[in-house]
């Protein structure tokens, strides 16, 4: 039981990470119509920049703005130099151009920081654990991640649903051409959206530093899961990114935690572990396949 | 055009002698890999360039083909798969089996994926490929993450398949047969419908063609092509591993297709050659070859139209 | 038995009713025109009849058979033909190839991967036959993307005819045509209409009065009037719906 709650919380934490990444990505695709494989690279840039500054200054908190600024600037440059040329192109060109960006970013980071994984220092006040229930100590830092994610979600909700910018975003997500026809400065909207996505990615990258290795290629690992979240949630939908992110995060974590154990009951331990892990890894993809069969546009499609 | 093809063919046939004379056996190895990847890239180009389906999971079928050879080898010593299916190391068995199995997997993946389109299609094909990747990683009896070493090369009419030159000619022959077949398919009634669907699916439906069926058929054929390439690769490397079907490998296949020119018949050949040559030479030159590759790719995508084939067309146009 | 029978079709988009209990028929030998002000829901209706859009309620019957749940290709196989308001053709292909593709669709045998499409002479002969005598005959080898708007409209019609449909749904075939082209199109449509029943959605009143044997008027998704040309001309509700366009109806 204790274990169940602990893994549930872990799933929530992973889900919140996925949400932060998926929110940006779904807006970029929904509003700008661009498939951005390099989103994971922004995640990585945020992680490295923040960790670097945190290491230099010895303060976790100083690393945070560094991560956001670095991710934001990188995002701005990427949008201006590459993404802007891809708006009119077909999906294939977008996939390949952003795939090229992944190669470039990975190599640049390797050049700058080497191949060894780097670790972000945990801030003092969050390095312990909190006793949520008797017998259930849970790392405080992970609770911080969950809290941050939920706050960002609430913030995005207010932004999207209660502000003028948010209204433009929602309109753009359901009918890009109409928004253009209405005379909105679409270039500015695009830059804002891309920038927002970059900031969210940078935030997520930095926050995951203390609990997961900061290394080259970290972006691609989580990128795939992020895309699954975007597709399941529905392109262009923040609500979808939230529901699908949390949902898939929990499912993935629970499968990985409990499936091998469950299988040990019916087969050899080594086989159970291998197959359990294999099936658990496939879990979110199977879920996506199921969702797409019933709702080909995802759970909360914004009308594409 | 025919003259150019004829010369190229002669060059390909004469290649082993040339590389031996030059004392560069590695070049023969490179050429063999180019032929194999040309087949894989051409099969992707069929659905991508001719059919307009952006599949990001094509490497999955490549991997299935390779593993068919590997698994058939693993059971060739007498202990049959599930007690009934005997293994084999005969190329005349392993190649058709690889093609058949990859076709079957493509049928399943295609049937499900083609119910979507656009970005959902790209993502779901990517996801299915990753699923297969994880599936093969979990197959510990067949090496799991490390893959399976194929100690005995496949036999073909008693030829010495361990000899690099013999293997090259066998693979080249298969490649030529493949491209001849591909040419027929592209110019067939089905090929015309497929290209129509790429240009305007709505119009084709209004004419009475059910796009799903044609796309699925193309998807299966393409999967079979990739499986063939994978089986050849397993023979060449005498090795099969899950990495062969990682999504980044699908990305590499797409790079080859676009470098060569999407939708052009020989584009994949140029693309595979360009990519592998670039990779080999760049890697020899600098450890950061991926950076150079990324930059080159970015320039090609953003700056040019039609890849190498397009370039050749324009050059020929100017020369007239 | 009507060639096309639409019964109580309803389509809503959120709170908006695009198709409001629409019923109509198209009989053998008739050219049934469907007119109405902009935004009346004509295209939405056509899309439901062809199968691109699923209605929320109601039935569509083709030659007595219920096709309401059938896909576009399935209805086409049963004899439904249509032209698009905004021409939808194979851009990279020539006029001739576009028509041949339609013939190919009708003749079948399209899963063959071993034949040669250029060798299916029958397709090309039929395409040439359809082109013969039309203004497009000299332009048969031109790619669609290089055609003028008027030529594209003509090609749309030829492509639809190549399938030898039982009934034609025409979505504003006159849209964007100049005076001479319009006259030619009217003549052509009259010829076609003599052989094939048509549901003609049109804005161009001259064409409607020249061709129609029956007219239905669609306003805000509802059929407010249906009858002969004289009936519709005299109908006060129709005149009101076309406020400010009285000269069009005279």
Image (cartoon, helix red, strand yellow):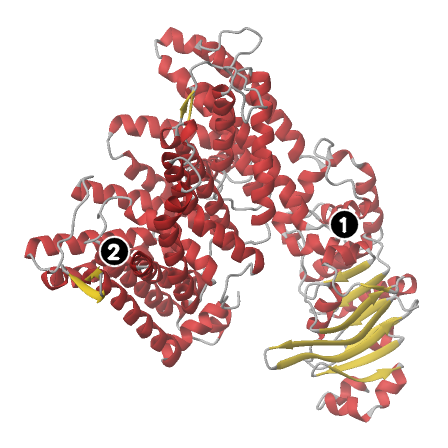
Residue at disc 2, secondary structure: helix
Toward which corner of the image does residue A57 lie, by quadrant? bottom left
Quarter of the image for the N terminus of chain C: give it. Answer: bottom right
Give x and y (percent) for residue C122: 83, 39
Does C211 sit left or right of B48 as displayed? right
Badge 1: chain ID: C
Of the numbered discs in the image, which one, if any, rests on residue C102?
1
Q: Label 2 to label 1, Cα distance in Å?
A: 54 Å
Does B78 sit left or right of B207 as displayed? left
Circle nearer the viewer, 2 or 1: 2
Q: Is residue B145 or residue A180 the one in the foreground?
A: B145
Mark 1 neighbour class, 10 Å CA radius: few under 14, some 14 to 19, many 20 or more:
many
Mark 2 lies on residue: A205
Q: Residue at x 22, y 65 (%)?
A: A134
Toward which corner of the image does residue A32 lie, by quadrant? bottom left
Q: Is residue C151 or residue B206 the one in the foreground?
A: B206
Q: Is residue C158 or residue A105 the one in the foreground?
A: A105
Badge 2: chain ID: A
Q: Residue at x 33, y 70 (%)?
A: A153
């Amino acid at each position: 039981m204790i274990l169940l709650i602990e893994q549930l919380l872990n799933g929530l934490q992973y889900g919140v990470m996925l949400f932060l990444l998926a929110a940006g990505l779904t807006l970029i695709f929904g509003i700008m119509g661009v498939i951005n494989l390099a989103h994971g690279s922004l995640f990585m840039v945020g992680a490295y920049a923040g960790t670097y500054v945190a290491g230099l200054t010895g303060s976790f908190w100083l690393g945070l703005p560094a991560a956001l600024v670095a991710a934001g600037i990188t995002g701005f440059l990427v949008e201006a130099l590459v993404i802007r040329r891809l708006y009119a192109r077909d999906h294939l060109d977008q996939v390949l151009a952003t795939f090229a960006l992944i190669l470039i970013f990975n190599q640049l980071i390797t050049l700058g920081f080497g191949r060894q994984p780097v670790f972000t220092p945990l801030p003092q006040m969050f390095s312990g654990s909190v006793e949520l229930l008797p017998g259930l100590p849970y790392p405080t830092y992970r609770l911080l991640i969950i809290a941050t994610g939920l706050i960002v979600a609430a913030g995005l909700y207010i932004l999207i649903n209660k502000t003028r910018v948010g209204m433009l975003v929602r309109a753009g997500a359901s009918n890009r051409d109409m928004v253009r026809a209405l005379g909105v400065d679409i270039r500015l909207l695009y830059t804002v959206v891309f920038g927002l996505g970059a900031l969210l990615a940078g935030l997520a990258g930095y926050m995951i530093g203390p609990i997961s290795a900061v290394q080259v290629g970290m972006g691609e690992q989580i990128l795939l899961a992020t895309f699954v979240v975007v597709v399941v949630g529905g392109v262009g939908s923040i609500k979808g990114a939230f529901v699908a992110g949390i949902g898939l995060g929990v499912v993935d974590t629970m499968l990985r935690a409990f499936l091998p154990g469950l299988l040990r009951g019916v087969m050899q331990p080594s086989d159970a572990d291998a197959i359990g892990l294999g099936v658990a890894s496939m879990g979110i993809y199977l879920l996506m396949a199921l969702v797409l069969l019933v709702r080909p546009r995802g759970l909360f499609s914004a009308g594409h | 055009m025919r003259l150019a093809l004829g010369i190229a063919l002669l060059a390909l046939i004469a290649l082993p002698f040339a590389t031996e004379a030059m004392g560069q056996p590695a070049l023969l190895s490179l050429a063999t890999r180019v032929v194999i990847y040309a087949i894989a890239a051409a099969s992707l180009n069929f659905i991508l360039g001719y059919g307009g389906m952006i599949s990001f999971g094509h490497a999955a079928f490549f991997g299935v083909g390779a593993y068919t050879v590997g698994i058939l080898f693993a059971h060739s010593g007498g202990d049959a798969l599930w007690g009934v299916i005997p293994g084999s190391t005969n190329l005349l068995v392993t190649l058709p089996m690889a093609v058949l199995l990859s076709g079957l997997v493509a049928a399943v993946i295609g049937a499900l994926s083609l119910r979507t389109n656009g970005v959902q299609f790209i993502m779901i094909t990517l996801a299915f490929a990753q699923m297969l990747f994880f599936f093969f990683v979990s197959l510990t009896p067949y090496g799991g993450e490390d893959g399976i070493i194929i100690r005995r090369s496949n036999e073909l009419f008693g030829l010495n398949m361990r000899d690099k030159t013999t293997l090259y000619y066998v693979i080249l022959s298969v490649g030529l047969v493949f491209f001849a077949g591909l040419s027929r398919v592209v110019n067939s009634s089905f090929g015309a419908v497929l290209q129509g669907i790429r240009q305007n699916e709505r119009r084709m439906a209004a004419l009475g063609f059910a796009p799903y069926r044609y796309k699925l058929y193309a998807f299966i054929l393409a999967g079979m092509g990739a499986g063939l390439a994978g089986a050849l690769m397993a023979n060449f490397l005498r090795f099969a591993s899950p990495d062969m079907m990682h999504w980044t490998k699908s990305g590499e296949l797409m790079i080859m297709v676009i470098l060569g020119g999407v939708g052009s018949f020989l584009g994949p050949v140029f693309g595979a050659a360009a990519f592998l040559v670039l990779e080999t030479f760049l890697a020899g030159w600098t450890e950061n070859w991926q950076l150079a590759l990324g930059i080159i790719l970015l320039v090609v995508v953003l700056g040019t139209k039609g890849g190498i084939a397009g370039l050749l067309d324009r050059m020929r146009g100017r020369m007239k | 038995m009507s060639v096309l029978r639409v019964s109580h079709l309803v389509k809503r988009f959120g709170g908006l009713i695009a198709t409001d209990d629409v019923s109509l028929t198209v009989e053998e030998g008739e050219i049934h025109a469907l007119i109405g002000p902009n935004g009346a829901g004509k295209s939405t209706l056509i899309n439901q009849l062809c199968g691109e859009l699923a209605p929320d309620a109601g039935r569509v019957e083709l030659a007595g058979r219920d096709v309401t749940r059938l896909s576009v290709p399935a209805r086409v196989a049963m004899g439904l033909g249509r032209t698009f308001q905004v021409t939808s053709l194979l851009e990279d292909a020539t006029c001739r190839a576009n028509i041949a593709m339609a013939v190919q669709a009708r003749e079948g045998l399209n899963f063959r991967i071993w034949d040669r499409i250029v060798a299916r002479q029958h397709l090309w002969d039929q395409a040439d036959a359809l082109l013969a005598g039309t203004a497009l005959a000299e332009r048969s080898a031109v790619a669609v993307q290089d055609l003028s708007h008027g030529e594209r409209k003509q090609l749309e019609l030829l492509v639809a005819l190549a399938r030898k449909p039982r009934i034609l749904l025409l979505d504003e075939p006159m849209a964007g045509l100049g005076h001479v082209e319009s006259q030619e199109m009217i003549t052509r449509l009259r010829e076609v209409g003599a052989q094939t029943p048509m549901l003609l959605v049109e804005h161009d009143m001259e064409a409607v009065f020249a061709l129609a044997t029956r007219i239905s008027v669609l306003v805000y998704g509802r059929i407010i009037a249906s009858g002969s040309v004289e009936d519709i001309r005299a109908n006060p509700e129709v005149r009101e719906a076309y406020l400010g366009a009285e000269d069009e109806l005279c």
